Amino acid sequence: MGAHPMTSRYPSIAPDILALFAARGAPAVDVPVLQPADPFLDMAGEDLRRRIFLTESETGAALCLRPEFTIPVCLDHIASQSGTPRRYSYLGEVFRQRREGGNEFFQAGVEDLGDRDIARADARSIADAHALLAMTLPGQALKITLGDQSIFEAVLAALGLPRGWRMRLARAFGSAEQLAAALADLANPQKNGALPEPVASLVADGDLDGLAGHIASTMSEAGLSASAGRTPQEIARRLVEKAELRSVRLSAEAFAALEKFLAIDVPLNLAAAALEDFAQSAGLSLGAALAGFSARVDAVSAEGMPSDAIRYDAAFGRPLDYYTGLVFEISVGDASRPLAGGGRYDRLLTLLGAKTPIPGVGFSVWLDRIEQLRGGDA
């Protein structure tokens, strides 16, 4: 990995941000603008997939303009065969279609790879993002919202939900609209809709390969590209999954417990106790997930962060499929658009080809939004 190039096109706050990253042990790196498309299409989440700029190499390989930095930095780390723990920072352009404020914008952030002290690394990520915003927006009241994918998944497992439902709800975590729709379906299972043949028979038989082949053929005849959205395999899996999910009805008691959990929204210093009270009242054991959560609260406090000024929202997630634990965003006051966002992704590097599991956590900041609040131009 080479040193990060600085150009006059970068935001005015770029040098200060890179200096802060270096002081915090995260030297700047550069990754190519053109990236292999498949990792983003497979792992980044539906919201980001819809907004990727796709192209092809001379050999026909699917490429895309860099839509974010986490996956490229992780791929570059794997290719360089660097040891861990290691921290990387970045500052550069990313490209997304249909984004308010323009399709090209600057992001900066830190990826923290290989630290086995999960709580400490999580707290450091939050603290680094907070320090960046405190430096660039002095005097602004920063609001930190924290969620936890692993706590949510532990609750789903403890409630005895079937694997299909746990997967659907876990994928919806991070999208209030998708989560509300999934919960509505869980409360009132829909009857099987009328599917055309041979789709209906293939779904009833659970024939994923046959169904994917039929969908691919239909898409080809209609002139649709699989790279423009969900793949035939993904569509087939979702159809079969939906059919299986319709047969599940959650008890009123379990559904009430899930709703009670999702309603938890408290200052971080009260969150562990709130989760313990919930688990006890619902007769559930959250085990290692709750122990990890409590350790993170202590680590946040050790970083000097005001834990009573950070809120834990049990229903809060971020719309990227690779998150496995901590998720967080930082905004100013009641602003709806976050200035920084991040989270933990312990499975990502293995999925990208790492030979051994490498835990990871990171965050990014939207520099154009920061510049707007500073009264400047990105």
Image: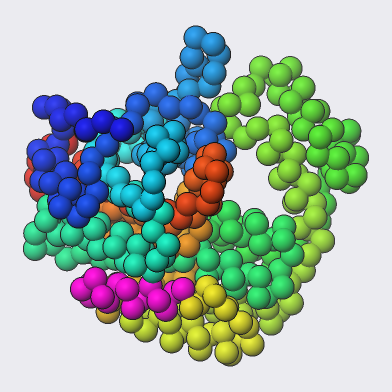
* Residue nearest the observer in this picture, 60 or 24: 24
**Furthest residue in direction top, as rendered:** 58
Quadrant for the N terminus in the image: top left
Magenta span main SS = helix
Quadrant for the C terminus in the image: top left
* Residue nearest the observer in this picture, 304 or 140: 304
Residue 123 pos. (x, y %): 32, 66
Residue 222 pos. (x, y %): 70, 19
Q: In the image, is 270 to the left or to the right of 305? A: right
- Identify the image quadrant of residue 213: top right
Whether residue 17 can be seen here: no
- Tell me how many marks there are: 0
Where 224 sits versus 184, above or below? Answer: above
Q: In the image, is 223 to the left or to the right of 72? A: right
Residue 35 pos. (x, y %): 43, 27
Q: In the image, is 13 to the left or to the right of 315? A: left
Where 196 sits versus 18, above or below? Answer: above
Name the residue at 51% across, 58% down.
324
- Identify the image quadrant of residue 78: top left
Q: Is residue 301 part of the magenta span, yes or no?
A: yes
Where 204 sits versus 285, above or below? Answer: above
Name the residue at 26% across, 40% down.
90
Name the residue at 36% across, 53% down.
85
Residue 219 pos. (x, y %): 71, 23
Q: Which residues are magenta?
A: 292-306
Name the residue at 81% across, 28% down.
214
* Residue nearest the observer in this picture, 307 or 77: 77
